[in-house]
Image: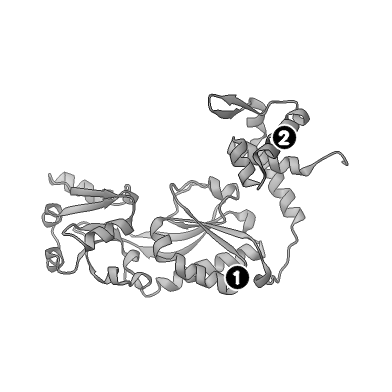
Amino acid sequence: MSNVDLNLLLALDALLAERSVTRAARRLNLSHSAMSRTLARLRVVTGDPLLVRAGRGLVPTPRALELVDHVHTLTRDALAVLRPQISEVDMASVELTFTVRASESFMKWLSAPVVKAVLEVAPRICLRFEAKPDKGAQPLREGLVDLEIGRIGTSAPEIRTRFLFHDHYVGVARIGHPMLEKEPVTIEQFAMCSHVVALQEGQAIKPLNDELERVGLRRNITIVVPGYPDAMRIARQSELIAIVPASCLGDVASTDGCRRLGRFDLPWPIPVFKVSALWHPRMDADPVHRRLRDLVISTCQAAYSGVTL
């Protein structure tokens, strides 16, 4: 065992996950040259090229593909064994990066109160927010993300979840917009308006779009933007209307800009959806992770406790 270097296992896990010497080096805080030398050592130790050049990138060999899951499991188990399990943690002295993956809307409305709550308890923590381009579970499985906030979109059976709040979609328009004077809004009135649409919406309001199509109507889309905050900003400064989750208008978002927006019920029912916190069971019992995720979860729940959805 004296000739076994467990750092090679960590490096192999990173290389197989990233399939890039540059990204693997960044993940392990190593230089590119150090990671290149490590890959050369791994090729000697395993007797396999592992990653080979294909155009401008690297592709795994068949042997490397066989090793991916096994190496990842071994790496996580080794780290768990070598990390002390402490029931009572001095959070004020903890130094680590805690990564939260969430939508742009979450980062705009809730990142500030979450940061405040976490730093009051753990001032040496680096709280890292990452965008959520999809609902895949791989970042949680690989340990690249500690906590995810949003709708449950993964079928990964092992992922742990905790309910945060219910949400549903509403229409928004600037205060004084004629649409706010119509109650209830008919589907014809809704279709006549010009719309700003968030790409973040995806297929969320498909029942409404299906009903519009059924009666021979469609949304008059004038502007398309990346996220709900962009759609709300344009709606409050124009005659356009938008569709956003009701949580975007909650108490946590009671800025001057949001107070200049009114809401109205959509002309066709859209199912209510759950917003949850998700994490991998690997970190379920970790005392630091548990304390930090509880802080994030309680902050989210408190922020929307009084929201009328």
**Rendered position, 206 above or below 296:** above
Where is residue 30? Give x, y as percent: 67, 45
**Rendered position, 99 above or below 306:** above
Amino acid type at circle 1 is Pro
Using residue 90 as the reference point, say whether residue 173 is left or right of it.
left
* Labels 2, 1: front one: 2
**Residue that extends furthest to the right in the rendered view of this protein:** 2
Where is mark 1, residue-wise? 123
Q: Which of 237 and 169 is in front in this view?
A: 237
Q: Residue at 60% across / 50% down in the picture?
A: 143
Specify the quadrant of the image occupied by residue 290.
bottom right
Secondary structure state at the residue bearing disc 2: helix
Measure the alpha-carbon separation of dots 2 and 1.
37 Å
Q: Residue at 57% across / 56% down in the picture?
A: 146
Where is mark 2, residue-wise? 37
Q: Residue at 27% across / 60% down in the picture?
A: 232
